[in-house]
Image (cartoon, grey):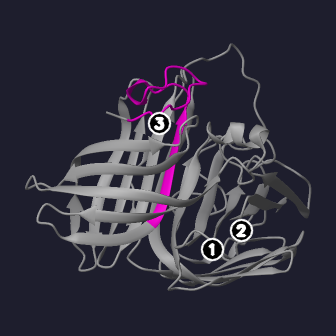
């Protein structure tokens, strides 16, 4: 149990050094996720950094979708004990002003580099705890806060400079920690077929005078295991929203949405309609390490100072055949229409995925795709 600079501060929550997490589960993680979304859909980037104390690993990734290509670099190294300076090889996150401003840089790595400064548009919001169980163990038990904002700076891919501005970008980020599947696969034992399907929707959206967060997770029958929906206004008001009804508009022959229509109501019973249009999407299983990514699994030991680059041709039918069965991040435009006719224009992240069957959407097995499947 090594000491770190953080042990100088009165922040301890357990009788152990800060770098020694309270759970003994090997799948304990502590991670940041960021996206960089061009409002017009010219490009988008997904990136993050994670620490896995029980595995002795830290790693990072940087994924860029532009045109019909999705390119990723992966970085991995032995974990260190200085959490005040999060970095993996040439990837670094500097907290300039906690919960407000962050400086993220990627030194030239496999033809990619970046220099970006994050500015939060509204205060960070603590989300509800997220838990999932199999028949034999806890598979996910995490705490997370999220924030919407903008970036300024640039991203470079093979000499092509993608300029990012506070007026042209929209973004969200989250910090999460707890237990989730990471690292090398463990021996399974007797097969556990408890997973019957997951329907997921995550919307951190920003408007001129408020932010909106919607999280929904359902099983194959449409039963919700996670739901939270709030409007958070610039003056500090938090409005809980209920009665949500969701219609996803899928591209025929896929599970990839091109938009959505959502309705919800406040405590007074006033309904708001929200319409989303996808401008560009990036499957997060293509280089970002989520949801069965064949190239990258978070927390996997790759050796010291490891870097690699992978690419995906999104015009290749064999590649895109996998996209429909993973979570997909979209940059979207958003129009919210209140009951009194007030219209709010915004943008943000539209993250959706249907893994396995989801009977309310018309997906009866693991391979079903949409004719024009609509959620009733």
- Packing grade of label 1 (10 A; few <14, some 14-19, many >=20) is some
The residue under label 3 is: 199
The residue nearer to you, when weighing 358 against 121, is 358
The residue under label 2 is: 3
C-alpha span from label 3 to label 2: 42 Å
Residue in the picture at 38% in, 27% down: 360
What element does badge 1 sit on?
helix
- Which image quadrant for residue 77? bottom right
Q: In which quadrant of the rendered image does the N terminus lie?
A: bottom right
Q: Name the spot of residue 344 as percent of width and height, x first.
A: 28, 71
Residue in the picture at 69% in, 44% down: 182
- Packing grade of label 3 (10 A; few <14, some 14-19, many >=20) is many
- Which image quadrant for residue 76? bottom right
C-alpha span from label 2 to label 1: 8 Å
Reading the chain from its start, which is encountered first: label 3 or label 2? 2
What element does badge 2 sit on?
loop
Q: Name the spot of residue 232 as percent of width and height, x first.
A: 28, 68
Q: Name the spot of residue 212 as percent of width and height, x first.
A: 34, 63
Q: Is residue 281 above or below residue 195?
A: below
The residue under label 1 is: 6
- Packing grade of label 2 (10 A; few <14, some 14-19, many >=20) is some
Q: Is residue 36 above or below residue 102?
A: above
The span shown in magenta is: 348-374
Residue in the picture at 46% in, 27% down: 358
Q: Name the spot of residue 125 as percent of width and height, x first.
A: 38, 66
What element does badge 3 sit on?
strand
**In this view, the mark in front (3 or 1):** 3
Q: Is residue 7 magenta?
A: no
**In this view, the mark in front (2 or 1):** 1
């Amino acid at each position: 149990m090594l000491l770190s600079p953080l042990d100088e501060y009165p922040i301890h929550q357990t009788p152990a050094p800060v770098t020694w997490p309270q759970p003994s589960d090997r799948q304990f993680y502590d991670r940041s996720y960021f996206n960089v979304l061009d409002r017009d859909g010219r490009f988008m980037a997904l990136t993050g950094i994670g620490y896995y104390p029980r595995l002795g690993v830290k790693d990072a990734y940087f994924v860029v979708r532009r045109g019909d290509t999705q390119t990723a670099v992966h970085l991995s190294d032995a974990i260190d004990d200085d959490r005040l300076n999060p970095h993996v090889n040439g990837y670094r996150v500097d907290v300039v002003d906690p919960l407000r401003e962050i400086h993220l840089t990627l030194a030239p790595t496999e033809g990619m580099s970046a220099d970006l400064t994050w500015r939060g548009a509204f205060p960070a919001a603590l989300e509800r705890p997220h838990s999932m169980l199999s028949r034999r163990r806890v598979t996910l038990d995490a705490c997370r806060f999220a924030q919407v904002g903008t970036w300024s700076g640039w991203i470079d891919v093979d000499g092509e400079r993608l300029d990012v501005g506070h007026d042209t970008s929209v973004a969200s980020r989250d910090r999460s920690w707890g237990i989730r599947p990471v690292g090398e696969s463990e021996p399974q034992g007797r097969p556990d077929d408890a997973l019957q399907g997951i329907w997921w929707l995550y919307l951190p959206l920003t408007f001129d005078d408020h932010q909106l967060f919607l999280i929904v997770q359902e099983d194959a029958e449409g039963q919700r295991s996670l739901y939270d929906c709030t409007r958070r206004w610039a003056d500090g008001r938090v409005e809980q929203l209920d009665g949500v009804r969701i219609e996803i508009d899928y591209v025929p022959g896929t599970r990839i949405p091109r938009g959505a229509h959502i309705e919800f109501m406040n405590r007074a019973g006033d309904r708001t309609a929200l319409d989303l249009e996808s401008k560009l999407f990036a499957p997060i299983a293509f280089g970002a390490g989520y949801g069965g990514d064949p190239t990258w699994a978070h927390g996997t030991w790759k050796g010291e100072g490891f870097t690699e680059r992978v690419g995906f041709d999104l015009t290749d039918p064999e590649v895109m055949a996998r996209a429909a069965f993973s979570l997909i991040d979209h940059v979207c435009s958003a129009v919210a229409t209140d009951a009194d006719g007030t219209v709010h224009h915004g943008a943000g992240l539209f993250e959706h995925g249907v893994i396995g069957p989801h009977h309310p959407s018309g997906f009866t097995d693991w391979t079903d795709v949409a004719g024009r499947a609509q959620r009733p």
